[in-house]
Amino acid sequence: MNRFAIFIALIVLNFALVAPTRAQLRPPSTPLVVHDPYFSVWSATDNLTDSETKHWTGASQPMAGLVRVDGNVYRFMGNAPASVPAMQQVSKVLTPTRTIYEFEKGGIRLTLTFFTPALAGDLAILSRPVTYISWDVKSMDSGTHAVSVYLDCSSLMAVNTAFEQVVWSRAKVGETELLSVGSVEQKVLGVSGDDLRINWGHFYLAAPDAANERLAAVNGREARNKFFTSGTLPDADVLDMPAAPRSGAPVLAAA
């Protein structure tokens, strides 16, 4: 069994989401990355590939997921690119700290886990605004398969509207590679109301430093096309900043 892992974070306050126990359940919306009302990403359809992921208010906050199996590419998260066939979702399980999907296609089973360590017995961990995403891959036909995984997160994760300007950067902390994106204005608690997304602080995509992992701040369509054709990411980050998600801001991508 092979495992791919990554985590995403935003520097804001955190609260515990109480989810149903491990029982048969059809939730009206499925929690993926859930920390507080400003930073909260959900899947509003039964299948993770039937729609783009959204903020709880219904605003678009897309995360796209692709898997490459022996040169063939399939979708496991999001409805784009529509030309890429979706994996068959065979199960979905919710626990108080995890949402677990299972998919099958191309002779493999892919288990996708969103884990938010909202542990009430440890306040330091409870207040940590981090969600871990992991992929476990298992052969279903006793064969050997070459498998790689792609994930991208829209810069809409860091702003209230698609018209707000953002800047982005990369860094390395210890052995961990990071990409970040945040609004230019950084007006902390500058607006009030219910129909709001976070537009202060920074959204991070991070991955362990390994020879077979790469992060890039790149055009989303170009990144997906490059992964589709070659299993890699574009060679260079987009550097023309600031930019708004509606007009040129990149996605944060990992492969």
Image: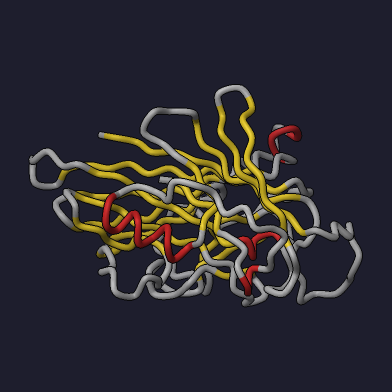
- Judge whether 250 appears above or below 117 on screen: below
Which residue occupies 72% across, 73% down?
161
Residue furthest to the right in view is 190
The residue lying toward the viewer, choosing from 29 and 5, is: 5
The residue lying toward the viewer, choosing from 40 and 181, is: 181
Residue 232 falls left or right of residue 18:
left
Residue 3 falls left or right of residue 202:
left
Which residue occupies 42% across, 62% down?
222
Tell me where residue 37 sits by quadrant.
Answer: bottom right
Tell me where residue 54 sits by quadrant.
Answer: bottom right
Name the image quarter holding the N terminus.
top left
The residue lying toward the viewer, choosing from 125 and 240, is: 240
Q: How many marks?
A: 0
Q: Position of residue 27 (x, y in %)?
A: 49, 69
Which residue occupies 44% across, 46% down?
235
Q: Position of residue 252 (x, y in %)?
A: 55, 52
Residue furthest to the front in view is 240
Q: Position of residue 177 (x, y in %)?
A: 56, 34
Residue 101 falls left or right of residue 176:
left
The residue lying toward the viewer, choosing from 65 and 21, is: 65
Name the image quarter holding the C terminus.
top left
Q: Position of residue 34 (x, y in %)?
A: 63, 56
Residue furthest to the left in view is 142
Residue 243 falls left or right of residue 232:
right
